[in-house]
Image: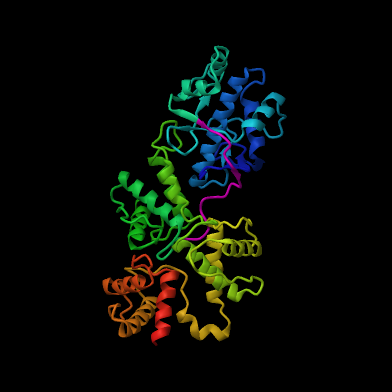
Amino acid sequence: MAVVTIPTSITVHLGAPNESADNIRVPYIDYIKNVVCSEIYPTWPTDAMLANIYTIQSFTMNRVFTEYYRTRGYSFDITNNTAFDQAFVPGRKFFEPISDLVDMVFNTYIIRGSQVQPLAAQYCSGSGVTCAGLSQWGTVSLANQGYSPTQILRYYFGGDVSLVYNAPTAPNIPSYSGTPFTIGSAGSDVRTIQRELNRISANYPAIPRIGSVNGIYDAATRQAVVVFQQIFGLEVDGVVGKQTWYKLKYIYNGVKNLSEIYSEGLTISEVERVFTNVLRRGDRGIAVRTIQYYLNFVGQFNDSLTIDITEDGIFGPATQQAVEAFQRYYGLTVDGIVGRNTWNTVLDVYRGILQSLPDEYMGLTYLLYPGYYIMRGASGKIVEQLQVFLRTIAQNNSDVPSVTVDGIFGTQTQAAVVAVQNLFDLDPDGVVGPITWNAIITLYNEYR
């Protein structure tokens, strides 16, 4: 599965990063053509031009992929200041040989070894100016000696670099979803937070490692976030909002040197874990059952959506159609795939319904899943209500141990939750998500 996409457009700041200047939105392919035409000559050998195009594209993609400037608080992707980035001249005309080459290879970039991120391919003219990366004029000499574009790149960047061809294109969407993450949040973004915190803790050992990188924002995750916020001078609230999200990404990129020619890099296994909550036709499991649960609930309260699917954990045609109907109604990309935007919108709609239920449902709200995960360390009214359910179940089913109704989710409550999960063949993790909640309510309604 591809984890790096070519953006359809890019935002360019017309000046130095701290300089007050315009930001302009440019189609990505036009941006590359502009930079290449501003950096090299169309009379150069084709292999030299291609080596430079791959280098410029990789540098650009690294800026976008690492959110180099956005993690620093800016609202653009790259500048046109050559002291920081690369030349871009608004309104300039393109040279035909360069334009034709870019059209053919705009979705090709450089990687190092088994790393995933586009190489931070530094370069300079090589005429009076030298750098640790590619020499633009040097590529001409090498091409005239018969070097291929790949050989030229390996000459400058090392023998372990290679090219990724035909990368897919997609809109350039900021990594922060817009929804703060706190106790009970779950999903691939939470897994990203946990993974980044654990790597950062290797350089900042005061940050406690999170033992279970499972995508559920638990007490251990919150504690790691609190310490991170303390170290880096952020508001200490244990919540990952926009500021904390981008500070995490900034520090993570820094400790892994993702914006340097030689970096620790990201491997495919690391990045794949970020996207495991993307659901599509053919998938099976608890995540599919969860989205089916949410969609059915939304369908009950939206007359414009005729959603009634079996919550069987199988992402079949009916589930795909339900996802497409939801996406169409709420203005999302209609692809039948549950990615981050669709997942978060489903959750937002679900929670919105809970907060504005019709009067005839108000007396039953205590039976409805609250919209966030409940786990060991949680406390309050919702835990107390959960314990009431479990106590009633335990009084009627000897397989479920009794619990004390004290509003504190401790080992006793966790054991009762695990027992119910075992009865329904669910993953016995002791965490109450929508499917486990539904199982508990099913038994509670049976026994009360």
List the single residue furthest toward the top: 145
Q: Is residue 66 left or right of residue 95?
A: left
Of 59 and 432, nearer the camera is: 432
Query: Whole-percent x and y of residue 228?
Result: 36, 53
**Where is 84 relative to 248, above or below?**
above
Whether residue 171 is in magenta: the answer is: yes
Whether residue 96 is in magenta: the answer is: no
Residue found 63% across the figure and 39% down from its top: 28
Q: Quadrant of the C terminus?
A: bottom left
Query: Whole-percent x and y of residue 144?
Result: 57, 12
Of 75 and 259, nearer the camera is: 259
Where does the magenta region start and end? 163-180
Of 42 and 412, nearer the camera is: 412
Main secondary-structure element of the magenta-colored stretch: loop
Query: Whole-percent x and y of residue 365?
Result: 49, 81
**Where is 264 relative to 275, above or below?**
above
When asked about the image quadrant of residue 320, the answer is bottom right
**Where is 256 relative to 163, above or below?**
below
Query: Whole-percent x and y of residue 415?
Result: 29, 72
When asked about the image quadrant of residue 394, the answer is bottom left
- The answer to whether one can see residue 407 in this image is yes
